[in-house]
Structures are given as structure tokens and as C-alpha cells.
Amino acid sequence: MAVLQKIRNRGILLVSIIALALFLFIIGDLLRGGEGLINQSRQNVGEIDGTSVSIQDYQSMFEDFQIYNEIAQQRTSTSEEENNQLKDMAWNTMIQNKLIEKECNALGLGVTDDEVAEVVRSGQNQLLQVPAFANQQTGRYDFAQLTTFLNEYKRLKDAGEQIPEVYEKLYKYYLFAQKQIRSQLLANKYQNLTAKCVLSNPVEAKQAYEERSNESDVLLVSVPFSSVADDKVTVSDADIDAKYNADKEKFKQYVETRDAKIIDVQVVASDADRKALAVEMDSAYAQLVAATTNTQAGNVARQNTSLVSYSDVFKSKDAFPAMIKNRLDGDSTSIAVGQTSKPVYDAATNAFYTVKLLDKKVVADSVLFRQMVVVGKDEQDITKKSDSIVNAIAAGAKFKDIAKKYNQVGDSAWITTAQFQNSTLDADNTSFINNLYNMTAGQTKAVKFSNGNTVILQVLESRNPITKYNVAAVVRELKFSDETYSAEYNKFSSFLAANSSLEQLEANATKEGYTVRPLSDISTSSHNVAGIHNTRDAIKWLFDDAKVNNISQLYECGDNDHLLVVALTGINPMGYASVDKVKDMLRTQLLNDRVMLLLIR
């Protein structure tokens, strides 16, 4: 009883404690639920017509476009700019597909599997025009080639065998092409339907007719704005407010953006770096001068890691960079055969270069030829067959008839200088090209390659003789050294440590040779900051962590040649931009309009 009495005496306290515990329990659940909602929202990359788009769906579309770029464009790697373009293509495609699908669903429009299959069979879509689906002889789309691949892929998968990575990518590309073909067919149906709804009216027809038929004579007079005195034209704040209200819809923002100020330091080569490279270029020049054969000159270019690779073939001037081309033009700076130009710095390419003209002659630009590959049990057998083929053709046998015996087509094809002169050629390709361009019309020749193969070449015709050059060059970009980068990094880091606020940065930047640059309306869709590569982390900081007047960490970005610090100066919510944000632009517009009126009067 004594215990019960104590409980009764402290009843209010106990109820309060229990109520507080329940409150904290409920609040904890709400907070955890809120966190779940926040995390869920972070899984969305955007919204299309009121429907959220998950990061997984977007990433899948982006990967499809990456495979498209790799297969269709035959690219094994992409730059940051190209990746950004693919991301934009993926997002824009998702928007278009979602919006058209919604309209078509309402109208009852659709695309059947048979319609897609017909496009795939006929090849009437650019997405199908890839080398992997092409006939090796004609170079054109071949449904049989695609069917063979699909059957082989299915066989490997059903058998549980290891599927090559290239097969997996090609199959994903095929599925992507199918999806895009379906979307394109649906869009075409919708556009064909809605095109019939666009009608003209008498007013538009009359206006269009008058614009086509009426002519006017106009007398123009150009008067510079500077001829109007500043005190003749004024713009008040009331004028700006009135202009803002009249054009307010132009300043509507559909996404939240950020304003920032940045200091961007681009690291460049120092005087010491320039002097060090100049010494290396003097050595390369001496090596080129001493080279007595084309092979030796080519080795000099390779050993000095020249940006212009050497191939022992004759090329037109267009194959070379402008600074080398200028040395071949025949003007006062040109060099003669056997001469080597002294190292010179070219500001346009930020590179030192030295050039040796090994040879120069007039030779055909285009050659029509035929070829067949000779196979045999061993090298002796191949040589015997090659000699027999060449002799038979010399005796009057037809090239195509012999090619058929070896299960080859033997058709003719043109080769032009432009097809090979911008490529790095190995020894076999170099031998192939030099033999073709040194043969006369009607000549047949057996050419042996390093891999043991032999090719029978026959030249049918040579056209368009032009001047070509055999050039060895050492071209080296002027880059900053690790020591230069470290010195610039340490200097900038020290400056940031001594100036920890935005006010201090702005006050002292100029004294240290830095420039504070303002940036407006940065959005989450921006690919970079101020056009500098690899600055997504800075954009992420602006939207996730930063508060107004905060200063970011020091970012190492660009092509490993930029140092960047960012300060958040403003947050612009969705809605209308404030009049203060657009005041300077409106003032300029009003001034221009009023000056124009004065000049007209």
C-alpha cells in the first residue's frame, strides 16, 4: 500500500515522463521516415511532365548511348565533352519519348512488333548501318549478317558458355536500336497525324503573299551611340521597375540556381620549363641533321615522342600541321630536300618543332587497284603460288578468274592519299601503300608482309598527280613540370589560408595576381564551372553543402592544369528573378532604346 501511495503522489511526474518518451519515439519515426523520403528524392535525377525519373532509369539510357557511341562511331574512349553530349542526348531522348508516349496513349496510337521487325529486316534506319551488321564485301547492311550474330549469341547463352564482351555490347546495341526504332516510328505516326491539323487562314496567307511580292527601297544611315551625350539620356529606378514588370515573364526561372564567385588559376609552363624543352629540342634537331636514312629520321621522331608521328610514305601538305605546312610552301621560310629547320616555338599550338624534308616528288593522288591474298601450307608454298599467279596474269590470264579459284572477289577499288596520310602506319601498311603508288598502270606484283602473308596487287589506273612530301618532324608541346605545378599550388594554398573569407579574397586577390570572377545562375544540369573540365565536385558542393558566403576547398581540375576555389554568393529559387538581379541588363536595354529614339528624331 505504501508503494501504491507513492505512485499516486508522483502520478503527474510519471505521466509526463511517459508522454515525453512517446513523443520522442514518434518524432524519431517521423525523422527516419523523412530521411527515407529525402534519400528517395536523391535517387531521382529529374521530373518529366510531373513524373519523377530515377537515377537508375537515366543511367541505363546513358549507358545505352555510350554503347551506341562505341559501336556506331567505332570509338573505344570518349572525352569529358563527348560524355556530356551523350548525357544530354540520353536526357533529351527520355523527355521526347515520355511526352510522345503520353500523347499517343491518349490517341490510341502504337507500334507493333511486326512494324519494328520490318524496319530491322529492310535496314531502313541509320542505327542499323554499323560495320558489325554489314556485309563484308559490299559494306552495306545485311539482315543475314545480323541474324547470324543473333543465332550465335543465343547458342552461346543457351549452352551456358562464356559470351565475349564484344558480343554482349553488340547485343545491347541491338536492343537499344530496337527501342529507338520503336520510338521513332511512334513519333513519325504522331507527327504525321498532327501535321494534318496545321491549317492556314486568310490573314496569314495574305501576309505571306505580301512578304514575297512587296519590295521596298530603304536608305540607311549609321550613327554611333557615342555621338549622343550621356546627359541627354537617363534611366531611373522607376523606369527599370516598369520595364521589369512589362517583361517579367522573361525572367521566370524553372529550376533553382546558384550565383558564385571563383578564382581559377591555370598552371602554365615556367621559364625554366621552356629552357629545359629548348635544350631537348636542340638535341632532337642535331639528331635529325645527322640522320642519313628515312628509318633513322623516323626513329628520331619516335624517340623524342613527337606529336606528329612518322610514316615512311609520301603525303600531301594537308596532312601536316600549319607550322610544318608553311615550311613546305616554297616561300622564304621553306626548306629544301635534305634540310632540317632549327627548333622554333609556335604560339598557336604551344609547341616547339623541328622539321626535316626527306624527299619531295609529284605522284598520283588516286590509284585504282585489285588485290588477292595468297594462302599456302608454308612460306615456300606461298612463294611458289605467288610467282605462278603473277606469271599467269603476265601471260594473259584474267585477275578475277584467278581470284575466284581462291574464293576471292578480286573487284577493283580506289585508294586516295587522304585515306591513309593522317593515320599511323605499321611496316606492312607502309609497304602496301608504297608499292601501290610506285607501280605503273597494268603492273602486277606480289608483296610479302611480315606476318607471312603475300598479297597480289594489280594497278589499273593512276589519277590526279600532286606534289607530295616525305617529312620527319619532332613536335613537342611546352608543358609545365611537376616542380612548377607544386610551386603554383603552394602559392595559391598559402593565399587561401591567409584569406579565409570572401571579403578578404576579393580585397587581396589582385595584389597576388589572382582574379575573382562572378558567375550567375549555375544549375545542377551544368556540366562544369566556367567551362573548366572535371569540376562536377564543385557544382555538387554548391548545391549540397554550401551556405551563402561559404568558400569551398581547393579543387585540382581541368586537364590537371587548373586550381579552383568557389564561393557561394546567392541562391536563386524557382520563380521570378528579382529586379536587382536583372537591373543592369534592363538599364542597358532602356538606354539603347532611348538613344535609338533620339537618333531617329
Image: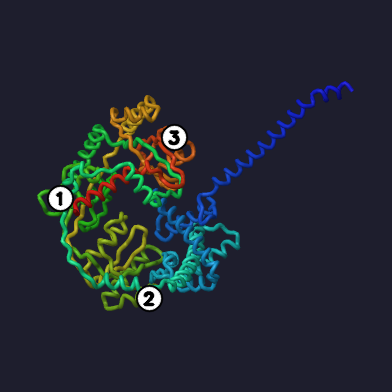
- Decide: is 379 above or below 407: above
Q: Is residue 117 left or right of residue 200?
A: right
Mark 1 lies on residue = 338
Other residues around mark 2 within 10 Å, as few (<14) / some (14–19) / many (≥20)? few
In this rendering, the label closer to the viewer, 3 or 2? 3
In three-dimensional space, the C-alpha distance between marks 3 and 1, rounded to whole angstroms, equals 66 Å
- Nearest the eye: 324 or 412: 324
Answer yes or no: do the residues labelled 3 and 1 have beta carbons within 8 Å?
A: no
Vertical comparison of 545 with 296: above or below: above
Does 69 sit left or right of 422 as displayed?
Answer: right
Look at label 2 and name its amino acid.
Lys
Name above or below for residue 118 compared with residue 180: below
Q: Between marks 2 and 1, how big is the CA–CA gap?
A: 47 Å
Q: Nearer the viewer, residue 349 or 601?
A: 601
Provide the residue designation for mark 3. 548
Q: Residues within 10 Å of mark 3 (few under 14, many from 20)?
A: some
Tally the marks: 3
Specify which label sits upstream in the sequence, 2 or 1.
Answer: 1
Q: Which residue is mark 2?
A: 404
Q: Quick one: label 3 or label 2, which is nearer the N terminus? A: 2
Secondary structure of the residue carrying numbered label 3: loop
Nearer to me, 572 or 402: 572
Which residue is depicted at the point 28% across and 66% down? 415
Q: Please, what is the three-letter code of the amino acid marked with disc 3?
A: Val
Q: Secondary structure at mark 2?
A: helix
Q: Can you give x and y, in whole percent of width and height, for residue 111 in the image? A: 53, 70
Which residue is drawn at the image coordinates 74% and 29% (left, top)?
16
Amino acid type shown at disc 1: Gly
